[in-house]
Amino acid sequence: MAPSVKGLWAIVFCATLWSTSGLFIKIIDWNPMIIAGARSFIAFLFILAVRRLHPIPPPPRGTRAFPMFMAAFFYAATMILFVIANKMTASANVILLQYIAPVWAAFLGWIIAKERPRSEHWVAMGAIAVGLYVFFKNGLSGGSNLGNGIAVISGVTFGAYSVFMRLQKKGRPEDSVLLAHLFTALICFPFLFVVPPIPTAPSIGAILALGILQIGVASLLFAYAIRRITAVQAMLTAVVEPVLNPLWVFVVTGEKPSPSALLGGSIILAAVIASSIIGARRQAA
């Protein structure tokens, strides 16, 4: 299997794990900052344990630290903003609005990583713009405008994260993941004293699932993939997440996205899936 195809499959599995976030976050009746911090603290411990069992070779000499810290900063911001938005608006809104990330990944990747988007990427982004117009045309499926706005900002930080991870394609992007979870845990830790959480069996089970599977294993898969495919291709392939995220929430809680959100989301998904297929065939050729 070609390295680029391995990268695409790693992103698919990563996005499938990411897609369970909306469901688990809805289950936990805690302050969103505490959820984000606890999830990242568990992920931090999990990734440390994995690295002790399977050591990663050190990065080459001369590897710059700036991309590592910037990727960690943007990933920490994305995780915190995503959890806050999920508590303020519908999960379908959050995940679909966050997926303006491919647009930012394309432009930032072109400027910073010098990876020019292909024609299929530009076509996909045009379709994404149409999808977003339809998505907003008749309003979103409940929730607050502030929550929807935070979801959009999380898409910007998510796109920037992918670009700075891509800059480490010859280094060790796993270091950024580890730092991001540590940053998130430290930023959110003081909220334990402001709004103490009430631990229950469902909330403890959900936070463990979030930390180990939804964000821990997924983070390692993303770090593996970003060495093999461009930032914009990673963001486009990760569209598996918005397909599955509202599905899990609907099955368990019955929360439905509005018809316009479904139509706009379908346009977005069709565009990015087609782009991913064309890109994979181009790389294989």
Image (cartoon, helix red, strand yellow):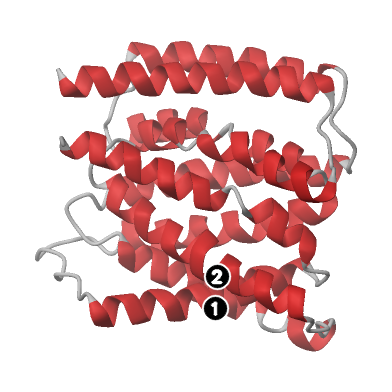
Where is residue 176? Give x, y as percent: 37, 64
Where is residue 140? Give x, y as percent: 84, 30
**Amino acid residing under circle 2:** Gly
As helix, strand or loop, the secondary structure at mark 1 comes to helix
Within-10-Å neighbours for mark 1: few <14, some 14–19, many 20+: many
Read off the residue under disc 1.
41
Which label belongs to residue 100? Answer: none
Read off the residue under disc 2.
211
Mark closer to the chain start, 2 or 1: 1
**Amino acid residing under circle 1:** Phe
Task: Relative to 220, say whether 58 is above or below.
Answer: below
Extreme residue in the bottom direction: 193
Can residue 161 be seen here? The reply is: yes
Where is residue 218? Give x, y as percent: 44, 57
Q: Closest to the observer: 110 or 126?
A: 126
Q: Closest to the observer: 198 or 68?
A: 198
3D distance between C-alphas at marks 2 and 1: 7 Å
* Residue located 69% across and 39% down the image: 247
- Determine contact: label 2, label 1, CB under 8 Å: yes
Image position of 210 (left or right of 83): left
* Residue located 71% across and 40% down the image: 246
Extreme residue in the front direction: 251
